[in-house]
Image (cartoon, grey):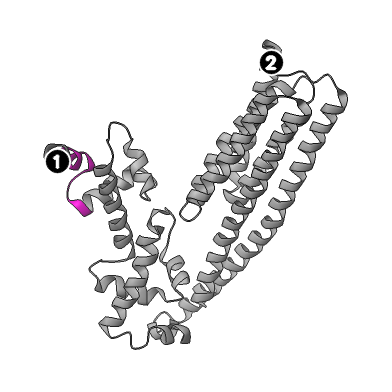
Amino acid sequence: MTADKEFQDKSVEALKRKLISQYVYLMSGILLAYSVVFYFIIKDVFFAACTLIYSVTMFYTFMVIRKSYNIKVLVHLYMSYAPLFAGFVMLDFWKFSAATAMWLLPVPLGAHIFLGKKYIYIYTLYILLIIIAVSILNKLYVFDYFALNDVKVIVASDTFVGVSNIAVFGLLLYYNEKIRKAEIESNILNKIEFSKQQENPDRSEEADFTEKEKAAYPNLENTEKYNLLFNDIRDIVEDQGYYKDVGFTISQLSNILKSNNLYISKSIKLNGFSNFSHYLNTCRIENVKKLLEENDISKVTLMYIYTESGFSNQSTFNRVFKQIEGVTPSEYLTNLNLEE
């Protein structure tokens, strides 16, 4: 049952990552098409260039980070800057048609799928403020980027926006249903597992080992076998950069390796680490030290370095750094500068 629960948790994350990739591909295509509309139908080279650059940047950036991004961080970033770009486009369309505001409508649904109820209200308020700002700015200033005097052109533009947003909503709703179902199944499995543990708290560790795990790593009492398992762990965590994921857990690792939490924990302990968290944080701190040595701290922020290494906030980073290195980050930097 534990393996089923871990698989289900991974399934929820996998669905969210798949939705993000599908959304990026769809939105990049839509923006690319919109740049063509701007260039050939609306006859505006500036906005055609803006949407083309936005499309290419979105696609390229995602392809670079697609293997090691944090879902919530990426979603927050996107839902912060994407509405601003939509508001920029809306500034000139507003006096002809308010239909461009439809670009903002998928934002609350995206917040519901990825972030939770609280953020639905936050991002709904955010897009309302953008719409109000666009309306006020259009009354105070005249934005003459281009002139939409042809009614057919306005209708064509509004139709494109409408169809594009229907496609986006369709994609979000399709995955929302699958994600909700996977989360419900995960919660059910969690309750069942908790109930079984309450009934039999002293069950042996061997009861959690599956036949697949025994076949993959037979006679795991042998230290050499644990070392082989640790090589696989290092490949995933260090070489593939999973330690950079703030939310990466031992359950996700065990699912990737098709192994068991207990085997993984013992393998990590036999290789000098107190637990999985200690191992993960050690990898992160090593990357921090590497980035500090490779970069000029006056040109990059410490926040960039610790978030790039998998830490979510500075207090956690400072605490872990002191625990592992014996000095604070600032003391380490001072020593590093003295050595230079």
Q: Is residue 329 magenta?
A: yes
78 in relation to 88, above or below? below
The part of the chain drawn in magenta is 324-335
The vertical placement of 63 against 108, above or below, is: below
Would residue 93 be visible to someone looking at this image? Answer: yes
Where is mark 2, residue-wise?
143
Task: Using the rendered view, name the quadrant where residue 111 is placed.
Answer: top right
Q: Looking at the rendering, in which quadrant would you find the C terminus?
A: top left
Position of residue 167 measured from the top left corner of the image (x, y, whole percent): 75, 47
Q: Which residue is mark 1?
A: 335
Circle 2 sits in a helix, a strand or a loop, which is it?
Answer: loop
Any mark on residue 300, and which?
none
Query: Is residue 265 visible to the viewer in this orientation of the structure?
Result: no
Task: Give the camera-side residue of 141 and 127.
Answer: 141
The quarter holding residue 122 reads top right
Does 231 lie within the magenta span? no
